[in-house]
Amino acid sequence: MTDYLLQLRGLTKAYPGVVANKNVSFDIGRGEIHALLGENGAGKSTLVKTIYGLVKPDSGTMTLEGQPFTPAEPRAARAAGVAMVFQHFSLFDALNVAENIALGMENPPAQSEIAARVRAVSDQYGLPLDPTRVVGELSAGERQRVEIIRCLLQDPKLLIMDEPTSVLTPQEVGILFETLRKLSAEGTAILYISHKLEEIRTLCENATVLRLGQVVGTCDPRSTSARDMAELMVGTKLHVPERAARPAGEIVLELKGLSAKAPHRFGTTLKDITIDVQKGEVLGIGGVAGNGQDELVAALSGEMRVSPAMVRYQGADIGQMPPNARRKIGLLAAPEERMGHAAAPDMSLIENAVMTATIREKLTQRGFVRWAKARSFADNVIKTFDVRTPGPANTARSLSGGNLQKFVIGREIMQAPDVLVVNQPTWGVDASAAAAIRQALLDLASKGAAVIVISQDLDELMEISDRFAALNEGRLSPPRPAQGLTVEQIGLMLGGAHDMEVAHVDV
Protein backbone atom coordinates (compact mmCIF):
# COMPACT_ATOMS: atom_id res chain seq x y z
CA MET A 1 0.00 0.00 0.00
CA THR A 2 1.14 3.58 -0.66
CA ASP A 3 0.08 7.08 0.33
CA TYR A 4 -1.51 7.39 -3.08
CA LEU A 5 -4.99 6.19 -3.94
CA LEU A 6 -4.58 6.20 -7.73
CA GLN A 7 -1.39 6.14 -9.78
CA LEU A 8 -1.29 6.53 -13.56
CA ARG A 9 1.84 5.58 -15.48
CA GLY A 10 2.42 6.13 -19.20
CA LEU A 11 -1.23 6.03 -20.29
CA THR A 12 -1.52 6.35 -24.06
CA LYS A 13 -4.61 6.22 -26.27
CA ALA A 14 -4.74 6.96 -30.00
CA TYR A 15 -7.64 7.25 -32.39
CA PRO A 16 -7.49 7.53 -36.20
CA GLY A 17 -5.76 10.83 -36.93
CA VAL A 18 -5.24 11.92 -33.33
CA VAL A 19 -3.38 10.88 -30.17
CA ALA A 20 -5.77 11.67 -27.32
CA ASN A 21 -3.40 10.74 -24.48
CA LYS A 22 0.36 10.33 -24.71
CA ASN A 23 2.41 8.91 -21.85
CA VAL A 24 0.24 10.47 -19.13
CA SER A 25 1.50 9.94 -15.58
CA PHE A 26 0.42 11.45 -12.25
CA ASP A 27 -0.80 10.47 -8.80
CA ILE A 28 -3.88 11.28 -6.71
CA GLY A 29 -3.59 11.05 -2.94
CA ARG A 30 -6.22 9.81 -0.52
CA GLY A 31 -8.63 12.61 0.31
CA GLU A 32 -6.97 14.92 -2.21
CA ILE A 33 -8.97 17.33 -4.39
CA HIS A 34 -6.96 17.21 -7.61
CA ALA A 35 -7.70 19.38 -10.66
CA LEU A 36 -7.29 18.12 -14.21
CA LEU A 37 -6.81 21.10 -16.51
CA GLY A 38 -6.44 21.53 -20.25
CA GLU A 39 -7.96 23.30 -23.22
CA ASN A 40 -10.61 21.63 -25.35
CA GLY A 41 -9.20 18.57 -27.06
CA ALA A 42 -6.31 18.28 -24.58
CA GLY A 43 -7.33 14.73 -23.69
CA LYS A 44 -9.12 15.20 -20.35
CA SER A 45 -12.27 13.34 -21.35
CA THR A 46 -10.37 10.37 -22.75
CA LEU A 47 -8.28 10.15 -19.58
CA VAL A 48 -11.20 10.14 -17.14
CA LYS A 49 -13.10 7.70 -19.35
CA THR A 50 -10.06 5.42 -19.10
CA ILE A 51 -10.14 5.64 -15.31
CA TYR A 52 -13.89 4.97 -15.32
CA GLY A 53 -13.66 1.96 -17.63
CA LEU A 54 -15.25 3.50 -20.72
CA VAL A 55 -11.99 3.54 -22.70
CA LYS A 56 -9.25 0.93 -22.84
CA PRO A 57 -5.75 2.46 -23.10
CA ASP A 58 -3.33 1.31 -25.80
CA SER A 59 -0.51 1.22 -23.25
CA GLY A 60 0.32 2.26 -19.70
CA THR A 61 -0.85 1.12 -16.29
CA MET A 62 -3.13 2.21 -13.47
CA THR A 63 -2.83 1.28 -9.80
CA LEU A 64 -5.63 1.70 -7.27
CA GLU A 65 -4.72 1.27 -3.59
CA GLY A 66 -1.49 -0.40 -4.63
CA GLN A 67 -3.23 -3.00 -6.81
CA PRO A 68 -3.39 -3.16 -10.63
CA PHE A 69 -6.51 -1.38 -11.86
CA THR A 70 -7.84 -2.33 -15.31
CA PRO A 71 -11.62 -1.76 -15.37
CA ALA A 72 -13.16 -3.30 -18.48
CA GLU A 73 -16.39 -1.32 -18.01
CA PRO A 74 -17.91 1.30 -15.68
CA ARG A 75 -19.50 -1.46 -13.58
CA ALA A 76 -16.02 -2.74 -12.71
CA ALA A 77 -14.78 0.78 -11.91
CA ARG A 78 -17.74 1.38 -9.61
CA ALA A 79 -17.17 -1.95 -7.88
CA ALA A 80 -13.56 -0.90 -7.23
CA GLY A 81 -14.70 2.40 -5.70
CA VAL A 82 -14.55 4.86 -8.61
CA ALA A 83 -17.64 7.02 -9.26
CA MET A 84 -18.20 9.75 -11.84
CA VAL A 85 -20.59 12.68 -12.23
CA PHE A 86 -20.74 13.54 -15.94
CA GLN A 87 -21.16 17.02 -17.39
CA HIS A 88 -24.38 15.93 -19.10
CA PHE A 89 -26.92 14.46 -16.72
CA SER A 90 -28.39 11.04 -17.50
CA LEU A 91 -31.77 11.29 -15.83
CA PHE A 92 -35.35 10.51 -16.88
CA ASP A 93 -37.63 13.52 -16.45
CA ALA A 94 -40.81 11.50 -15.95
CA LEU A 95 -39.39 9.42 -13.06
CA ASN A 96 -38.88 10.58 -9.51
CA VAL A 97 -35.51 10.92 -7.76
CA ALA A 98 -35.55 7.49 -6.08
CA GLU A 99 -36.56 5.76 -9.33
CA ASN A 100 -33.72 7.44 -11.23
CA ILE A 101 -31.22 6.39 -8.58
CA ALA A 102 -32.51 2.81 -8.67
CA LEU A 103 -31.75 2.63 -12.40
CA GLY A 104 -28.05 3.10 -11.62
CA MET A 105 -27.90 0.24 -9.14
CA GLU A 106 -26.96 -3.36 -9.91
CA ASN A 107 -29.46 -4.84 -7.45
CA PRO A 108 -31.70 -2.01 -6.27
CA PRO A 109 -33.56 -2.47 -2.97
CA ALA A 110 -37.18 -1.44 -2.40
CA GLN A 111 -38.10 2.14 -3.28
CA SER A 112 -38.77 2.91 0.40
CA GLU A 113 -35.24 1.86 1.33
CA ILE A 114 -33.72 3.90 -1.51
CA ALA A 115 -35.76 6.93 -0.41
CA ALA A 116 -34.54 6.53 3.18
CA ARG A 117 -30.90 6.26 2.03
CA VAL A 118 -31.28 9.32 -0.21
CA ARG A 119 -32.66 11.35 2.72
CA ALA A 120 -29.85 10.18 4.99
CA VAL A 121 -27.06 10.99 2.53
CA SER A 122 -28.61 14.33 1.52
CA ASP A 123 -28.79 15.32 5.20
CA GLN A 124 -25.27 14.08 5.91
CA TYR A 125 -23.67 16.09 3.11
CA GLY A 126 -25.91 19.17 3.05
CA LEU A 127 -27.54 18.36 -0.30
CA PRO A 128 -31.28 18.80 0.35
CA LEU A 129 -33.27 16.52 -1.96
CA ASP A 130 -36.75 15.00 -1.81
CA PRO A 131 -36.61 11.44 -3.20
CA THR A 132 -40.29 11.55 -4.20
CA ARG A 133 -40.03 14.58 -6.49
CA VAL A 134 -40.28 14.11 -10.24
CA VAL A 135 -36.93 14.93 -11.88
CA GLY A 136 -38.54 17.00 -14.65
CA GLU A 137 -39.65 19.48 -11.98
CA LEU A 138 -36.18 19.92 -10.50
CA SER A 139 -33.80 22.82 -11.13
CA ALA A 140 -30.44 22.13 -12.79
CA GLY A 141 -28.74 22.32 -9.39
CA GLU A 142 -31.15 19.80 -7.89
CA ARG A 143 -30.62 17.44 -10.82
CA GLN A 144 -26.91 17.55 -10.16
CA ARG A 145 -27.59 16.61 -6.54
CA VAL A 146 -29.37 13.49 -7.82
CA GLU A 147 -26.25 12.52 -9.77
CA ILE A 148 -23.95 13.22 -6.81
CA ILE A 149 -26.09 11.34 -4.31
CA ARG A 150 -26.33 8.42 -6.74
CA CYS A 151 -22.51 8.32 -6.63
CA LEU A 152 -22.28 8.79 -2.85
CA LEU A 153 -24.56 5.80 -2.27
CA GLN A 154 -21.71 3.73 -3.76
CA ASP A 155 -19.37 4.93 -0.95
CA PRO A 156 -16.67 5.87 -3.50
CA LYS A 157 -12.94 6.07 -2.85
CA LEU A 158 -12.49 8.35 -5.90
CA LEU A 159 -15.13 10.75 -7.23
CA ILE A 160 -14.59 12.19 -10.72
CA MET A 161 -16.47 15.43 -11.47
CA ASP A 162 -16.64 16.87 -15.01
CA GLU A 163 -17.59 20.57 -15.20
CA PRO A 164 -19.83 20.27 -12.12
CA THR A 165 -20.67 23.98 -11.74
CA SER A 166 -21.57 24.83 -15.34
CA VAL A 167 -25.31 24.99 -14.53
CA LEU A 168 -25.21 26.12 -10.89
CA THR A 169 -25.97 29.42 -9.19
CA PRO A 170 -23.25 30.95 -6.96
CA GLN A 171 -25.20 29.75 -3.92
CA GLU A 172 -25.38 26.19 -5.28
CA VAL A 173 -21.63 26.26 -6.03
CA GLY A 174 -21.01 27.12 -2.39
CA ILE A 175 -23.11 24.14 -1.25
CA LEU A 176 -21.30 21.82 -3.67
CA PHE A 177 -17.86 22.94 -2.48
CA GLU A 178 -18.79 22.37 1.17
CA THR A 179 -19.90 18.86 0.23
CA LEU A 180 -16.67 18.13 -1.63
CA ARG A 181 -14.55 19.42 1.25
CA LYS A 182 -16.45 17.18 3.66
CA LEU A 183 -15.91 14.17 1.39
CA SER A 184 -12.21 15.03 1.18
CA ALA A 185 -11.94 15.26 4.95
CA GLU A 186 -13.48 11.77 5.18
CA GLY A 187 -10.81 10.38 2.83
CA THR A 188 -12.58 10.42 -0.55
CA ALA A 189 -10.29 11.63 -3.35
CA ILE A 190 -11.80 13.94 -5.96
CA LEU A 191 -10.60 14.43 -9.53
CA TYR A 192 -12.10 17.75 -10.57
CA ILE A 193 -12.37 19.01 -14.16
CA SER A 194 -13.40 22.62 -14.78
CA HIS A 195 -12.64 25.57 -17.03
CA LYS A 196 -13.52 27.97 -14.20
CA LEU A 197 -10.03 28.59 -12.92
CA GLU A 198 -10.97 30.79 -9.98
CA GLU A 199 -13.03 27.87 -8.69
CA ILE A 200 -10.01 25.61 -9.11
CA ARG A 201 -7.96 28.07 -7.03
CA THR A 202 -10.61 28.07 -4.31
CA LEU A 203 -11.13 24.31 -4.10
CA CYS A 204 -8.15 22.27 -5.29
CA GLU A 205 -4.84 21.38 -3.67
CA ASN A 206 -2.97 20.20 -6.78
CA ALA A 207 -3.46 20.45 -10.53
CA THR A 208 -2.19 18.44 -13.48
CA VAL A 209 -2.22 20.28 -16.81
CA LEU A 210 -2.66 18.51 -20.16
CA ARG A 211 -1.87 19.99 -23.56
CA LEU A 212 -2.33 18.02 -26.79
CA GLY A 213 -2.72 14.83 -24.78
CA GLN A 214 0.46 15.20 -22.72
CA VAL A 215 1.19 16.36 -19.19
CA VAL A 216 2.92 19.75 -19.55
CA GLY A 217 3.02 20.79 -15.91
CA THR A 218 1.68 20.64 -12.40
CA CYS A 219 0.95 23.40 -9.93
CA ASP A 220 -0.62 24.34 -6.63
CA PRO A 221 -3.72 26.31 -7.69
CA ARG A 222 -3.86 28.07 -4.33
CA SER A 223 -0.61 29.91 -5.13
CA THR A 224 -0.95 30.14 -8.93
CA SER A 225 -2.98 32.83 -10.70
CA ALA A 226 -5.85 31.91 -13.00
CA ARG A 227 -4.06 33.65 -15.86
CA ASP A 228 -0.85 31.65 -15.29
CA MET A 229 -2.83 28.39 -15.27
CA ALA A 230 -4.66 29.37 -18.46
CA GLU A 231 -1.42 30.22 -20.23
CA LEU A 232 0.11 26.91 -19.12
CA MET A 233 -2.93 25.17 -20.63
CA VAL A 234 -2.70 26.89 -24.02
CA GLY A 235 1.06 27.45 -24.20
CA THR A 236 0.72 31.10 -25.21
CA LYS A 237 -0.28 34.45 -23.76
CA LEU A 238 -4.00 34.71 -23.08
CA HIS A 239 -5.98 37.11 -25.25
CA VAL A 240 -8.35 39.46 -23.44
CA PRO A 241 -11.44 40.42 -25.53
CA GLU A 242 -11.48 44.06 -26.61
CA ARG A 243 -14.61 46.08 -27.16
CA ALA A 244 -14.65 48.54 -30.04
CA ALA A 245 -16.58 51.77 -29.54
CA ARG A 246 -19.78 51.67 -31.55
CA PRO A 247 -22.65 54.13 -31.74
CA ALA A 248 -26.19 53.07 -30.97
CA GLY A 249 -27.93 51.89 -34.11
CA GLU A 250 -31.54 51.59 -35.16
CA ILE A 251 -33.83 49.04 -33.55
CA VAL A 252 -33.70 45.79 -35.53
CA LEU A 253 -35.59 43.33 -33.29
CA GLU A 254 -38.59 43.97 -31.04
CA LEU A 255 -40.45 41.70 -28.66
CA LYS A 256 -43.84 43.08 -27.64
CA GLY A 257 -45.66 41.22 -24.88
CA LEU A 258 -44.14 37.92 -25.99
CA SER A 259 -46.04 35.15 -24.24
CA ALA A 260 -46.01 31.46 -25.12
CA LYS A 261 -46.85 28.23 -23.35
CA ALA A 262 -44.01 25.79 -22.79
CA PRO A 263 -43.90 23.23 -25.62
CA HIS A 264 -43.62 20.33 -23.16
CA ARG A 265 -44.60 19.43 -19.62
CA PHE A 266 -41.31 20.36 -17.97
CA GLY A 267 -40.67 23.57 -19.90
CA THR A 268 -41.15 27.19 -18.84
CA THR A 269 -43.93 29.44 -20.12
CA LEU A 270 -42.81 32.82 -21.47
CA LYS A 271 -44.71 35.70 -19.88
CA ASP A 272 -45.13 39.17 -21.38
CA ILE A 273 -41.55 39.76 -22.54
CA THR A 274 -41.09 43.24 -24.01
CA ILE A 275 -37.72 44.42 -25.22
CA ASP A 276 -35.94 45.90 -28.24
CA VAL A 277 -32.44 45.27 -29.58
CA GLN A 278 -30.37 47.72 -31.62
CA LYS A 279 -27.88 47.19 -34.40
CA GLY A 280 -24.34 47.04 -33.03
CA GLU A 281 -25.52 46.11 -29.54
CA VAL A 282 -24.74 43.11 -27.35
CA LEU A 283 -27.72 42.41 -25.11
CA GLY A 284 -26.85 40.03 -22.29
CA ILE A 285 -29.60 37.90 -20.73
CA GLY A 286 -28.75 36.09 -17.50
CA GLY A 287 -30.68 33.55 -15.47
CA VAL A 288 -30.45 30.25 -13.65
CA ALA A 289 -31.00 27.23 -15.91
CA GLY A 290 -34.64 26.34 -16.49
CA ASN A 291 -36.12 29.83 -16.35
CA GLY A 292 -37.17 30.01 -20.00
CA GLN A 293 -33.88 30.31 -21.86
CA ASP A 294 -34.59 27.46 -24.28
CA GLU A 295 -38.13 28.67 -24.92
CA LEU A 296 -36.93 32.22 -25.63
CA VAL A 297 -34.36 30.99 -28.14
CA ALA A 298 -37.03 28.81 -29.78
CA ALA A 299 -39.40 31.79 -30.07
CA LEU A 300 -36.67 33.93 -31.64
CA SER A 301 -35.31 31.26 -33.98
CA GLY A 302 -38.75 30.22 -35.27
CA GLU A 303 -38.68 26.71 -33.79
CA MET A 304 -41.63 27.78 -31.65
CA ARG A 305 -44.26 29.94 -33.39
CA VAL A 306 -45.91 32.72 -31.40
CA SER A 307 -48.94 34.94 -31.85
CA PRO A 308 -48.76 37.68 -34.52
CA ALA A 309 -47.08 40.98 -33.64
CA MET A 310 -45.16 39.56 -30.67
CA VAL A 311 -41.85 39.34 -32.60
CA ARG A 312 -40.94 42.06 -35.11
CA TYR A 313 -37.81 42.13 -37.23
CA GLN A 314 -36.93 45.40 -38.95
CA GLY A 315 -40.54 46.46 -38.45
CA ALA A 316 -42.10 43.32 -39.95
CA ASP A 317 -44.09 40.72 -38.00
CA ILE A 318 -42.20 37.40 -38.05
CA GLY A 319 -43.96 35.58 -35.18
CA GLN A 320 -45.27 32.85 -37.50
CA MET A 321 -42.17 32.68 -39.73
CA PRO A 322 -40.28 29.33 -39.71
CA PRO A 323 -36.53 29.04 -38.97
CA ASN A 324 -35.22 28.90 -42.55
CA ALA A 325 -37.22 31.96 -43.55
CA ARG A 326 -35.77 33.83 -40.58
CA ARG A 327 -32.27 32.72 -41.52
CA LYS A 328 -32.80 34.01 -45.05
CA ILE A 329 -33.59 37.53 -43.81
CA GLY A 330 -30.67 37.53 -41.37
CA LEU A 331 -31.89 36.25 -37.98
CA LEU A 332 -29.76 33.29 -36.87
CA ALA A 333 -29.65 31.35 -33.61
CA ALA A 334 -27.42 28.80 -31.88
CA PRO A 335 -29.12 26.72 -29.14
CA GLU A 336 -27.55 25.57 -25.88
CA GLU A 337 -27.63 21.83 -26.58
CA ARG A 338 -24.90 21.37 -29.15
CA MET A 339 -25.05 17.58 -29.59
CA GLY A 340 -28.36 16.57 -31.11
CA HIS A 341 -29.85 20.05 -31.46
CA ALA A 342 -27.18 22.36 -32.86
CA ALA A 343 -25.39 19.46 -34.55
CA ALA A 344 -26.28 15.96 -35.74
CA PRO A 345 -23.84 13.63 -33.92
CA ASP A 346 -23.24 11.09 -36.69
CA MET A 347 -23.09 13.54 -39.59
CA SER A 348 -19.82 15.08 -40.77
CA LEU A 349 -18.93 18.68 -40.09
CA ILE A 350 -19.52 19.35 -43.79
CA GLU A 351 -23.05 17.97 -43.53
CA ASN A 352 -23.63 19.90 -40.31
CA ALA A 353 -22.55 23.05 -42.10
CA VAL A 354 -25.07 22.36 -44.85
CA MET A 355 -27.89 21.99 -42.33
CA THR A 356 -27.87 25.65 -41.23
CA ALA A 357 -25.78 27.49 -43.82
CA THR A 358 -27.43 26.31 -47.05
CA ILE A 359 -29.48 29.45 -47.61
CA ARG A 360 -27.03 32.19 -46.67
CA GLU A 361 -23.95 30.47 -48.11
CA LYS A 362 -25.78 29.23 -51.24
CA LEU A 363 -24.70 25.63 -50.68
CA THR A 364 -27.29 24.13 -53.06
CA GLN A 365 -27.96 24.58 -56.75
CA ARG A 366 -31.04 23.26 -58.53
CA GLY A 367 -31.81 21.07 -55.54
CA PHE A 368 -28.33 19.51 -55.30
CA VAL A 369 -25.76 20.16 -52.59
CA ARG A 370 -22.63 21.93 -53.79
CA TRP A 371 -20.31 19.69 -51.77
CA ALA A 372 -17.06 21.42 -52.73
CA LYS A 373 -18.44 24.76 -51.55
CA ALA A 374 -19.84 23.15 -48.40
CA ARG A 375 -16.45 21.62 -47.62
CA SER A 376 -14.78 24.97 -48.18
CA PHE A 377 -17.19 26.68 -45.79
CA ALA A 378 -16.69 24.00 -43.11
CA ASP A 379 -12.93 24.25 -43.56
CA ASN A 380 -13.11 28.02 -43.12
CA VAL A 381 -15.05 27.65 -39.88
CA ILE A 382 -12.53 25.09 -38.60
CA LYS A 383 -9.54 27.29 -39.39
CA THR A 384 -11.04 30.58 -38.23
CA PHE A 385 -12.27 29.21 -34.89
CA ASP A 386 -9.36 26.80 -34.28
CA VAL A 387 -11.57 23.71 -34.16
CA ARG A 388 -9.34 20.76 -33.25
CA THR A 389 -10.28 17.98 -35.66
CA PRO A 390 -8.44 15.98 -38.34
CA GLY A 391 -10.75 17.46 -40.96
CA PRO A 392 -14.27 18.48 -41.98
CA ALA A 393 -15.20 14.92 -42.96
CA ASN A 394 -15.06 13.87 -39.31
CA THR A 395 -18.37 13.49 -37.48
CA ALA A 396 -19.65 15.97 -34.92
CA ARG A 397 -19.58 13.16 -32.35
CA SER A 398 -15.81 12.77 -32.78
CA LEU A 399 -15.12 16.30 -31.49
CA SER A 400 -14.65 17.20 -27.85
CA GLY A 401 -17.52 19.22 -26.40
CA GLY A 402 -15.60 22.50 -26.50
CA ASN A 403 -14.42 22.02 -30.07
CA LEU A 404 -17.94 21.23 -31.23
CA GLN A 405 -19.09 24.40 -29.46
CA LYS A 406 -16.49 26.42 -31.39
CA PHE A 407 -17.70 24.89 -34.65
CA VAL A 408 -21.39 25.55 -33.91
CA ILE A 409 -20.86 29.19 -32.89
CA GLY A 410 -18.39 29.81 -35.71
CA ARG A 411 -20.78 28.33 -38.29
CA GLU A 412 -23.40 30.92 -37.36
CA ILE A 413 -21.07 33.92 -37.01
CA MET A 414 -19.46 33.28 -40.38
CA GLN A 415 -22.84 33.58 -42.10
CA ALA A 416 -22.75 37.31 -41.23
CA PRO A 417 -26.18 37.57 -39.56
CA ASP A 418 -27.93 40.85 -38.88
CA VAL A 419 -29.20 39.40 -35.59
CA LEU A 420 -27.53 36.50 -33.78
CA VAL A 421 -29.08 34.80 -30.75
CA VAL A 422 -26.73 32.47 -28.84
CA ASN A 423 -27.49 30.42 -25.74
CA GLN A 424 -24.48 29.51 -23.56
CA PRO A 425 -21.88 30.40 -26.23
CA THR A 426 -18.85 29.34 -24.16
CA TRP A 427 -20.36 26.47 -22.16
CA GLY A 428 -17.67 23.87 -21.50
CA VAL A 429 -14.90 25.60 -23.47
CA ASP A 430 -11.48 26.51 -22.11
CA ALA A 431 -10.32 30.02 -21.27
CA SER A 432 -8.56 30.62 -24.57
CA ALA A 433 -11.47 29.38 -26.69
CA ALA A 434 -13.96 31.31 -24.56
CA ALA A 435 -11.99 34.51 -25.10
CA ALA A 436 -11.90 33.86 -28.86
CA ILE A 437 -15.66 33.26 -29.04
CA ARG A 438 -16.41 36.40 -27.01
CA GLN A 439 -14.12 38.42 -29.24
CA ALA A 440 -15.90 37.05 -32.33
CA LEU A 441 -19.27 38.10 -30.89
CA LEU A 442 -17.92 41.58 -30.12
CA ASP A 443 -16.45 41.83 -33.63
CA LEU A 444 -19.82 40.84 -35.10
CA ALA A 445 -21.53 43.60 -33.12
CA SER A 446 -18.88 46.13 -34.17
CA LYS A 447 -19.85 45.38 -37.79
CA GLY A 448 -23.42 46.40 -37.03
CA ALA A 449 -25.10 43.13 -36.06
CA ALA A 450 -27.40 42.90 -33.05
CA VAL A 451 -26.21 40.12 -30.72
CA ILE A 452 -28.28 38.53 -27.95
CA VAL A 453 -26.17 36.45 -25.58
CA ILE A 454 -28.04 34.21 -23.14
CA SER A 455 -25.69 32.82 -20.52
CA GLN A 456 -25.44 31.56 -16.96
CA ASP A 457 -21.89 32.93 -16.77
CA LEU A 458 -22.37 36.38 -15.27
CA ASP A 459 -18.69 37.29 -15.68
CA GLU A 460 -19.06 36.61 -19.38
CA LEU A 461 -22.16 38.78 -19.68
CA MET A 462 -20.58 41.68 -17.79
CA GLU A 463 -17.50 41.43 -20.01
CA ILE A 464 -19.24 41.73 -23.37
CA SER A 465 -22.74 43.18 -22.82
CA ASP A 466 -23.89 46.73 -23.44
CA ARG A 467 -27.15 46.08 -21.60
CA PHE A 468 -28.18 43.33 -19.19
CA ALA A 469 -31.57 41.76 -18.45
CA ALA A 470 -32.49 38.80 -16.23
CA LEU A 471 -34.83 35.94 -17.03
CA ASN A 472 -36.80 34.56 -14.08
CA GLU A 473 -39.66 32.04 -14.39
CA GLY A 474 -40.30 33.11 -17.96
CA ARG A 475 -40.31 36.86 -17.26
CA LEU A 476 -37.61 39.24 -18.46
CA SER A 477 -36.54 42.20 -16.34
CA PRO A 478 -36.24 45.64 -17.95
CA PRO A 479 -32.71 45.88 -19.41
CA ARG A 480 -30.13 48.07 -17.68
CA PRO A 481 -26.69 49.31 -18.79
CA ALA A 482 -24.25 46.54 -17.92
CA GLN A 483 -21.47 48.91 -16.93
CA GLY A 484 -21.61 49.63 -13.20
CA LEU A 485 -24.06 46.88 -12.23
CA THR A 486 -23.13 45.35 -8.87
CA VAL A 487 -23.37 41.72 -7.81
CA GLU A 488 -26.19 42.69 -5.44
CA GLN A 489 -28.18 44.34 -8.22
CA ILE A 490 -27.67 41.39 -10.55
CA GLY A 491 -28.71 39.01 -7.77
CA LEU A 492 -31.98 40.90 -7.27
CA MET A 493 -32.67 40.89 -11.00
CA LEU A 494 -32.02 37.14 -11.24
CA GLY A 495 -34.41 36.64 -8.33
CA GLY A 496 -37.21 38.44 -10.17
CA ALA A 497 -37.00 41.82 -8.41
CA HIS A 498 -38.80 44.74 -10.05
CA ASP A 499 -36.75 47.53 -11.56
CA MET A 500 -37.72 49.86 -8.73
CA GLU A 501 -36.31 47.45 -6.15
CA VAL A 502 -33.09 46.98 -8.08
CA ALA A 503 -32.60 50.71 -8.37
CA HIS A 504 -32.59 51.10 -4.57
CA VAL A 505 -29.73 48.71 -3.89
CA ASP A 506 -26.84 50.59 -2.28
CA VAL A 507 -23.75 50.73 -4.43
Image (spheres, rainbow, N blue to C red):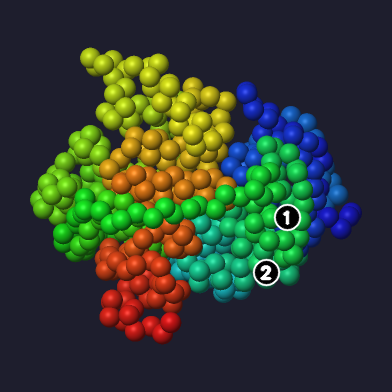
Please tell me which residue is depicted at 46% across the width and 36% down the height of the picture. 407
Helix, strand or loop status at disc 2: helix
Q: Residue furthest left?
A: 308
Number of residues whose C-alpha sits closer than 10 Å to that of mark 1, classed few (under 14), some (14–19) or many (20 or more):
many
* 143 on left or right of 281: right
Question: What residue do we see at 21% from left, 53% from top?
Answer: 250
Which image quarter: residue 205?
bottom right
Mark yes or no: residue 491 visible: no
How many numbered discs?
Answer: 2
Pointer 2 local density, CA inside 10 Å: few below 14, some 14–19, many at least 20: some
Going from N to C along the chain, the mark reached first, 2 or 1, is 2
Residue type indicated by callout 2 = Arg
Amino acid type, mark 1: Ala
Q: Is residue 178 visible?
A: yes
Secondary element at image label 1: strand
Up-down relation of residue 393 to residue 414 (above or below): above
Residue 373 at x, y = what percent? Answer: 38, 19
Q: Residue furthest right?
A: 1
Q: Which residue is mark 1?
A: 207
Residue visible at 38% across and 22% down in the picture = 374
Which of the 4 image quarters holds residue 135? bottom left
Q: Which mark is residue 176?
A: none
Q: Quadrant of the N terminus?
A: bottom right
Residue sitting at x 31%, y 56%: 247
According to the picture, the residue beneath numbered tag 2 turns out to be 181
Foreground of the two, 434 or 171: 434
Name the quarter where the C terminus is drawn. bottom left
Q: CA distance from mark 2 to mark 1?
A: 16 Å
Residue 242, x across and y down, in percent = 48, 53
Q: Residue 274: percent from the left, percent from the top?
A: 20, 62
Whether the residues at callouts 2 and 1 have beta carbons within 8 Å, the answer is no
